[in-house]
Image (spheres, rainbow, N blue to C red):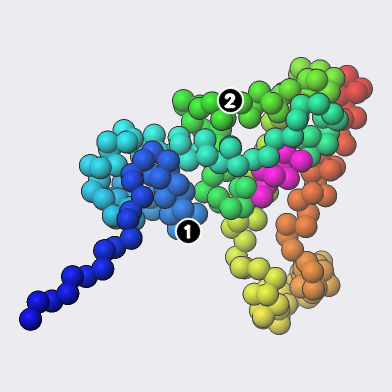
Amino acid sequence: MTTPPKPDREARAPLSVERVIDTAMQLSDESGIEKLTIRRLADELDVTPMAIYRYTASKDEIVDGMVEAVFTEIELPALEGDWRAAMRQRCVSMHEVLLRHPWAPPLMESRPAPGPALLHHHDVVLGYLRQGGVPLPWAAHAYAILDSYVFGFAMQEANLPFGGDEQIGEMADAIVSSIPAHLYPYLREFTAEHALKPGYAFGNSFEVGLDLILDAIGAAATAH
C-alpha cells in the first residue's frame, strides 16, 4: 500500500536583507543582542549561515541595518510648527520605540557608517531647533541633552527588576518588609506610600522629566 504524500509545507518567504534584519531584531528583542549570532539567525530562518552571508557581509552589517530600522520607527513630525511640540512628539515616540527594542539605546549613536535613516533623523531634529530660532550652540546642547535623557530613561526602565505593576503588587509585602523603617525611613515611605500604590509606574516620570528639560532648554536658548 502506497503511503500518501505529506501535505506541502507552507511556502517559506524568500530570503532577503529585509528578512534577515527583521528576524535579527525579533531575536534581539526576545533575548538581547549579545546572544545574536549568525548561526542562531540561520537556525531561526531555517537556512545555512552561508546563505545569510550572500545578503550581508557580517554581523556588524546586520546591526547597522537593525539600527537603521529602529530610526525608521520613530515618528518625526513635519518641520513646520513649534519646535518644542515637535521635539516632544519625537522624544515620546523614540521612548516608545526603544522600549520595544531594549537592545538599541547603546547602539543608536555608535555606528561608524551611519545610514540614510539615521542621517535623515538627525537632520530633521536639528531642523526643528534651527527653524524654531534656537541658536546653533543651543541646538547642539538640546540635541545632546534630550537624547541622553531618552536613551538613559529607556535603558533604566527596561532593566527594572520587576516585570510590571502586577508583579510589584504581588511582591508588595515582601518589598516593604525588606526595608527597615528605622534605617531607611524615606525609602520606605516612598516605596509603601507611592511606588506600591495602584497606578504607579516608573515610566510615568518620563514625560514629566521631558517637559522640564524642554522648558529649561527653551528658557536658556531665549536668554542667549
User: Residue 61: percent from the left, percent from the top?
Assistant: 39, 34
- SS class, disc 1: helix
Residue 150 or residue 172, whichever sits in front: 150
Which three-letter amino acid code belongs to the residue tagged 1?
Glu
Which one is nearer the viewer's eye here, 195 or 73?
73
- Name the residue tied to disc 1: 30
Provide the secondary structure element on which disc 2 rests: helix
Q: Which residues are magenta?
A: 89-96
Q: Main secondary structure of the magenta part?
A: helix
Asked whether 79 falls inside the magenta stretch, the response is no
Q: Amino acid at mark 2?
A: Leu
Q: Classify the position of the C terminus by image quarter.
A: top right
Query: Which residue occupies the foreground of this view, 55 or 107?
Result: 55
Is residue 194 found left or right of 42 in the rendered image?
right
- Tell me the residue at 7%/81% (across/down): 1
Choose top left, top right, bottom left or bottom right for residue 140.
top right
